[in-house]
Protein backbone atom coordinates (compact mmCIF):
# COMPACT_ATOMS: atom_id res chain seq x y z
CA UNK A 1 0.00 0.00 0.00
CA UNK A 2 1.27 3.45 -0.90
CA UNK A 3 1.88 5.94 1.89
CA UNK A 4 1.16 9.54 0.85
CA UNK A 5 2.60 12.40 2.89
CA UNK A 6 1.14 15.94 2.65
CA UNK A 7 3.83 18.19 1.19
CA UNK A 8 2.20 21.28 -0.30
CA UNK A 9 4.68 22.54 -2.88
CA UNK A 10 7.81 21.27 -1.13
CA UNK A 11 9.00 18.63 -3.58
CA UNK A 12 12.46 17.68 -4.85
CA UNK A 13 13.70 15.83 -7.93
CA UNK A 14 12.77 12.16 -7.60
CA UNK A 15 9.53 12.72 -5.66
CA UNK A 16 6.22 11.36 -6.90
CA UNK A 17 3.44 13.89 -6.28
CA UNK A 18 -0.35 13.53 -6.40
CA UNK A 19 -2.84 16.43 -6.46
CA UNK A 20 -6.31 17.32 -7.77
CA UNK A 21 -6.30 19.83 -10.62
CA UNK A 22 -9.39 21.66 -11.95
CA UNK A 23 -10.15 21.58 -15.69
CA UNK A 24 -11.32 24.93 -17.10
CA UNK A 25 -13.13 25.89 -20.32
CA UNK A 26 -13.85 29.31 -21.82
CA UNK A 27 -17.53 30.16 -22.05
CA UNK A 28 -19.18 33.08 -23.79
CA UNK A 29 -18.65 34.76 -27.13
CA UNK A 30 -17.74 38.33 -26.25
CA UNK A 31 -16.80 38.30 -22.63
CA UNK A 32 -14.83 35.13 -22.06
CA UNK A 33 -15.29 33.62 -18.62
CA UNK A 34 -13.73 30.45 -17.31
CA UNK A 35 -16.00 27.68 -16.10
CA UNK A 36 -14.78 24.60 -14.26
CA UNK A 37 -15.90 21.50 -16.18
CA UNK A 38 -14.14 18.77 -14.21
CA UNK A 39 -11.28 17.69 -11.97
CA UNK A 40 -8.14 15.69 -12.83
CA UNK A 41 -6.42 13.58 -10.20
CA UNK A 42 -2.79 13.93 -11.29
CA UNK A 43 0.08 11.65 -10.30
CA UNK A 44 3.47 12.72 -11.65
CA UNK A 45 7.17 12.38 -10.92
CA UNK A 46 9.35 15.46 -10.48
CA UNK A 47 11.99 15.55 -13.22
CA UNK A 48 13.61 18.92 -12.51
CA UNK A 49 13.19 22.20 -10.66
CA UNK A 50 13.51 25.59 -12.33
CA UNK A 51 14.36 28.33 -9.87
CA UNK A 52 12.18 28.61 -6.79
CA UNK A 53 8.85 28.79 -8.60
CA UNK A 54 8.64 26.14 -11.33
CA UNK A 55 8.47 22.33 -11.19
CA UNK A 56 8.86 20.09 -14.27
CA UNK A 57 6.91 16.85 -14.03
CA UNK A 58 6.34 13.66 -16.01
CA UNK A 59 2.79 12.22 -15.86
CA UNK A 60 2.47 8.76 -14.33
CA UNK A 61 -1.33 8.66 -14.06
CA UNK A 62 -4.22 11.00 -14.83
CA UNK A 63 -7.79 10.20 -13.78
CA UNK A 64 -10.66 12.53 -14.66
CA UNK A 65 -13.41 12.89 -12.05
CA UNK A 66 -16.46 15.12 -11.55
CA UNK A 67 -17.14 15.77 -15.24
CA UNK A 68 -19.79 18.49 -15.55
CA UNK A 69 -20.40 18.30 -19.31
CA UNK A 70 -21.86 15.61 -21.57
CA UNK A 71 -18.76 15.28 -23.79
CA UNK A 72 -16.04 13.02 -22.27
CA UNK A 73 -12.63 14.55 -21.53
CA UNK A 74 -9.36 12.89 -22.52
CA UNK A 75 -6.84 12.38 -19.69
CA UNK A 76 -3.20 13.37 -20.08
CA UNK A 77 -0.99 10.60 -21.48
CA UNK A 78 1.57 8.72 -19.41
CA UNK A 79 5.03 10.21 -19.87
CA UNK A 80 3.74 13.61 -20.98
CA UNK A 81 5.86 16.52 -19.72
CA UNK A 82 4.22 19.17 -17.53
CA UNK A 83 5.40 22.44 -16.04
CA UNK A 84 3.56 23.74 -12.98
CA UNK A 85 4.17 26.47 -10.43
CA UNK A 86 4.79 25.41 -6.86
CA UNK A 87 1.79 27.51 -5.84
CA UNK A 88 -0.42 25.28 -8.04
CA UNK A 89 0.71 22.24 -6.07
CA UNK A 90 0.19 24.10 -2.77
CA UNK A 91 -3.36 25.13 -3.74
CA UNK A 92 -4.12 21.59 -4.87
CA UNK A 93 -3.01 20.21 -1.50
CA UNK A 94 -0.34 17.99 -3.04
CA UNK A 95 0.84 14.78 -1.41
CA UNK A 96 4.09 13.01 -2.13
CA UNK A 97 4.84 9.31 -2.05
CA UNK A 98 7.10 8.27 0.82
CA UNK A 99 10.53 7.18 -0.39
CA UNK A 100 10.86 3.39 -0.33
CA UNK A 101 13.40 1.33 1.57
CA UNK A 102 14.76 1.32 5.08
CA UNK A 103 16.70 4.55 4.55
CA UNK A 104 14.24 6.18 2.14
CA UNK A 105 13.02 9.18 4.14
CA UNK A 106 16.44 9.57 5.80
CA UNK A 107 18.08 9.77 2.36
CA UNK A 108 15.52 12.37 1.27
CA UNK A 109 16.19 14.41 4.41
CA UNK A 110 19.91 14.40 3.61
CA UNK A 111 19.20 15.45 0.02
CA UNK A 112 17.29 18.56 1.11
CA UNK A 113 19.43 19.44 4.12
CA UNK A 114 21.04 22.90 3.97
CA UNK A 115 23.95 21.59 6.03
CA UNK A 116 24.99 18.87 3.55
CA UNK A 117 25.90 20.87 0.55
Image (cartoon, helix red, strand yellow):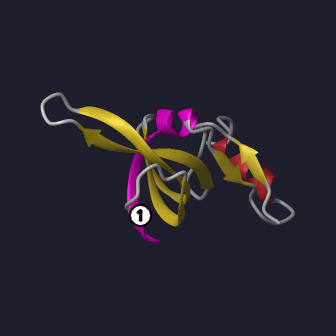
Outermost residue to the front: 70
Indicate the quadrant where residue 114 lies.
top right
Outermost residue to the left: 30
* Residue 79 belongs to the span the image colors magenta: yes
Indicate the quadrant where residue 94 lies.
top right
Report helix, strand or loop for mark 1: loop
- Quadrant containing the N terminus is bottom right
Would you place residue 53 above or below residue 22 in this image? Answer: above
Residue 95: x %, y % from top left: 67, 46
Nearer to us in this view, 105 or 65: 65
Outermost residue to the bottom: 78
Residue 108: x %, y % from top left: 71, 51
Is 68 left, or right, of 106 in this rendering? left
Would you place residue 47 above or below residue 23 in this image? Answer: below
Would you place residue 115 above or below residue 82 in this image? Answer: above
Residue 33: x %, y % from top left: 27, 31
* Residue 72 belongs to the span the image colors magenta: no
Q: Residue at x 26, y 38 (%)?
A: 27
In the rendered structure, which segment of residues is drawn in magenta? 73-91
Is 64 left, or right, of 76 in this rendering? right
Residue tagged by mark 1? 72
Q: Residue at x 78, y 64 (%)?
A: 100
Nearer to us in this view, 81 or 40: 40
Amino acid sequence: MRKWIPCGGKVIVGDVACWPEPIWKEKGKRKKTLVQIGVRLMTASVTRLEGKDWVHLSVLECVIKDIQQPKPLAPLRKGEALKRKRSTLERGQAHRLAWAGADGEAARALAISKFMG
